[in-house]
Amino acid sequence: PARQWPVLTVTLLVGVGLLLTALDVFRWGLVLVGAALLLGAALRWTMPRVGMLAVRSRFTDIATYGVLGLSIALLALMAQPNPVLEIPFLKDTLHFTVS
């Protein structure tokens, strides 16, 4: 049980993020979910034993947690209305893809 603190930490943070999302603070709740997954990637990279946080090979776990965490956090920051993060070329890309 003592080795399971990394997965419990990540799970607790994801739970708090989902609770915030359910309480209508969706942007920061989802940023917290993304940050929790990025923390999981960092823990998997730095610690030799992370208990149940290690599911596959080290590289696959880090890549999966990192890509999903970064994607969720960036998409939450770009969500409408009033996005915190604006990427200028996305508007032009949407303009050319939707007629």
Image (tube, rainbow, N blue to C red):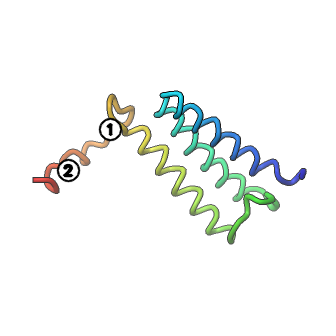
Residue at position x 42%, y 38% in the image: 77
Q: In the image as oriented, which residue stretches furthest toward the right? A: 2
Count the labels in the image: 2
Q: Give residue 3's position: percent from left, percent from top.
A: 86, 54
| SS assignment at label 2 | helix
Whether residue 53 sits left or right of residue 91 in the image: it is right
Give the mark, 2 or 1, whose residue is nearer the N terminus.
Answer: 1
| SS assignment at label 1 | loop
Whether residue 47 sits left or right of residue 37 in the image: it is right
Task: Identify residue type, mark 1.
Answer: Glu
The label nearer to you, 2 versus 1, is 2
Q: Is residue 55 above or below residue 15?
A: below
Q: In the image as oriented, which residue stretches furthest toward the bottom? A: 57
* Residue at mark 2: 94
Q: Give residue 61's position: percent from left, percent from top.
A: 64, 64
Whether residue 9 sits left or right of residue 27 in the image: it is right
Choose top left, top right, bottom left or bottom right for residue 87. Answer: top left
Choose top left, top right, bottom left or bottom right for residue 53. Answer: bottom right
Residue at position x 77%, y 50% in the image: 6
Who is closer to the viewer here, 43 or 55?
55
Q: Give residue 55's position: percent from left, percent from top.
A: 70, 66
Task: Identify residue type, mark 2.
Answer: Leu
Residue at position x 81%, y 48% in the image: 5
* Residue at mark 1: 86
Mark 2 surroundings: few (<14), some (14-19) or many (≥20) residues within 10 A: few
